Image (cartoon, rainbow, N blue to C red):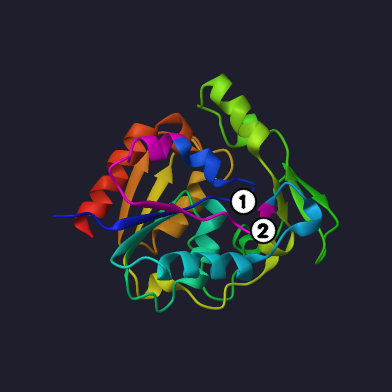
Amino acid sequence: MSLPSLVLVPGAWHKPEHLARLIDELRDVDIHTVALASSGDDPAKLGDMHQDASLIEKAVAAIDGPVVVVAHSYGGIPTSQGLVGADNVRRIVYLAAFQIEVGESLLSSAGGSPAPWWKIHHAGADGYVEAMNPEDVFYGDVDPDIARQAVAQLGYQSYLSKTQEQTQAAWHTIPSTYVICEADNALPPFAQEHFANRAGRVTRMATSHSPFLSQPAELARIIRDELASA
């Protein structure tokens, strides 16, 4: 039996390059990645959450056959927004991700106050956010050399993507799995527990926010199980 295709959606500030170690563990799987418009190296050219949702929708629609989508962190929001009505998506896996409800934004679902490690440059339509202290926030259990490389690859994130409300939620109709990262310094585990109540299945990893870097083989095993069951 052939496995479904896999679409990987990175989180805020991150790029497909950050997922290379995970992709190496899944070489026999048909993998597609999405580069988010809201993340990038030029703060003057950042898109918003709805552009991200459109990119994810198009990436899935271009695949002829069943798909499982794995969305990390912020990536859960445009994934939920963009995949309503995507008939070929068999399951969404929310990896330490924002599995939020219609009418919520990333900021509102986190209590309405920016994280202390956000450095906000202009809180408006042309604003952007820089992630401070990413070694501890994102990569607490990652090998230091790998973490340094990951930090060097980080981009900026548009402020709009943090505040735009989700207007639809694909997880209402598409089965979902939530992966809780129990040593996460970016998205607190208690918040992940809350989001996980919306998923059909829940699994856990004793990792930081970035198991695709710290435990790629174990994360690949979890994803294989999801692909097989889909």
Q: Nearer the viewer, residue 11 or 163?
A: 11
* Residue 61 position within the rendered picture, expressed as x and y whole percent measured from the top left: 41, 71
* Residue holding disc 2: 38
Question: Element under label 2?
Answer: loop
The amino acid at mark 1 is Ala
Classify residue 113 as left or right of residue 148. right
**Crowd rating for badge 2 (residues with CA inside 10 Å; few <14, some 14–19, many 20+):** many
Q: Which mark is residue 12?
A: 1
* Residue 108 position within the rendered picture, expressed as x and y whole percent measured from the top left: 64, 64
Residue at 38% of width from left, 48% of height from top? 179
User: In the picture, which quadrant includes the C terminus?
Assistant: bottom left
Classify residue 103 as left or right of residue 19. right
Q: Which image quadrant for residue 198?
A: bottom left
Among the two numbered marks 1 and 2 on one chain, the one whose residue lies closer to the N terminus? 1
Residue at 61% of width from left, 57% of height from top? 110
178 over 50 or under it: above or below = above
Chain part drawn in magenta: 21-39
What is the C-alpha distance between the residues marked 1 and 2? 8 Å
User: Does residue 114 appear anywhere in the picture?
Assistant: no
* Residue 126 position within the rendered picture, expressed as x and y whole percent measured from the top left: 82, 63
- Do the numbered discs 1 and 2 sit on residues whose CB atoms are within 8 Å? yes
Q: Which mark is residue 186?
A: none
* Residue 229 position within the rendered picture, expressed as x and y whole percent measured from the top left: 20, 56
Classify residue 84 as left or right of residue 119. left
Farthest-out residue, left: 1
